[in-house]
C-alpha cells in the first residue's frame, strides 16, 4: 500500500526546508516595545505534525510505532504547539518580560531595569544520557535583595538577550560574565 507519492514527499521536504531557512523566531517592534516570539509557522507545524502523527498512528496501530504516534501526536498538538504560541520576550526602556512554559502553567519573569543592581551571566552543565547539556541563565540581582533567574532559552539567544544587556548597560548596570567556556 502506497500512502504518499514521491512528488508529495519531495514537495513537503522542500516546504519544510524553506520554513527552516525563514527563521524560527520573529522580532516585532511596536512603538518603543520590542517583542520576540517564535515564528507563526513553528507552533502551527508542531500542532499539524501532532495531528498527522495521530492519524498515521491509527493507520499503523498493529505496530508498536503506531501506538507511540497515537500517544505522542496529541501531546505535541495539545501541549507543545499552543505553548510555542505563548512563549515571548517583551522589552522596552523600563523593563523586560519573559513568558515561557506550557500554556496552562506559564513561567513569567517581569524585571524592571530600575530594580536591578547587577546581572550575572551563568551556565550550568550536567551529564545526560547523550553527553553533556549546558543551560544558560541571567541572574538579575535586585535592590530588594531578591534575585530573578531568567533562562536564556532559544528566544533569548536569537537576539533578545543581547538587546536586554544593551539596555541594562545604558542604565549603568554591571554585567558579570561567569559562563564557563
Image (cartoon, helix red, strand yellow):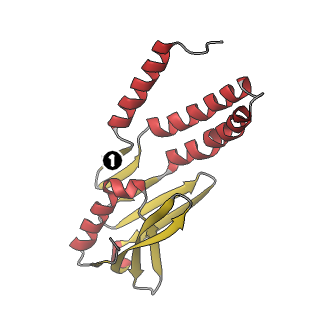
Q: In which quarter of the image is the C terminus?
A: bottom left
Quick check: 41 above or below 10? below
Quick check: 5 above or below 168? above
Name the side, left or right, on which 4 lies relative to 11.
right
- 117 or 42, which is in the foreground? 42
Q: Name the residue under label 1.
A: 27
Residue under the point 26% across and 67% down: 167
Dividing the picture into quarters, in which one does residue 72 lie? Answer: top right
Name the side, left or right, on which 44 lies relative to 161.
right
Give the total of numbered labels: 1
Q: Say which element carries label 1.
A: strand
Q: Where is residue 179 in the image (x, y as percent from the top left)?
A: 34, 73
- 104 or 62, which is in the foreground? 62
Quick check: 86 above or below 180? above
Residue under the point 67% across and 38% down: 74
Residue under the point 47% across and 64% down: 132
Amino acid at each position: 500500500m502506497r500512502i504518499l507519492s514521491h512528488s508529495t514527499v519531495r514537495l513537503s521536504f522542500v516546504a519544510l526546508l524553506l520554513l527552516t531557512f525563514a527563521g524560527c523566531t520573529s522580532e516585532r517592534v511596536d512603538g518603543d516595545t520590542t517583542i520576540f516570539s517564535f515564528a507563526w509557522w513553528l507552533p502551527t507545524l508542531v500542532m499539524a505534525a501532532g495531528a498527522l502523527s495521530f492519524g498515521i498512528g491509527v493507520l499503523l496501530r498493529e505496530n508498536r510505532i503506531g501506538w507511540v504516534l497515537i500517544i505522542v501526536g496529541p501531546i505535541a498538538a495539545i501541549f507543545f504547539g499552543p505553548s510555542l504560541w505563548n512563549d515571548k520576550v517583551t522589552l522596552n526602556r523600563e523593563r523586560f518580560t519573559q513568558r515561557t512554559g506550557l500554556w496552562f502553567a506559564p513561567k513569567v519573569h517581569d524585571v524592571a531595569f530600575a530594580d536591578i543592581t547587577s546581572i550575572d551571566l551563568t551556565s550550568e552543565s550536567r551529564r545526560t544520557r547523550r553527553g553533556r547539556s549546558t543551560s544558560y541563565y541571567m541572574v538579575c540581582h535586585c535592590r530588594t535583595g531578591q534575585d530573578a533567574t531568567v533562562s536564556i532559552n532559544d528566544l533569548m539567544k536569537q537576539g533578545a538577550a543581547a538587546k536586554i544587556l544593551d539596555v541594562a548597560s545604558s542604565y549603568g548596570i554591571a554585567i558579570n560574565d561567569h559562563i564557563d567556556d
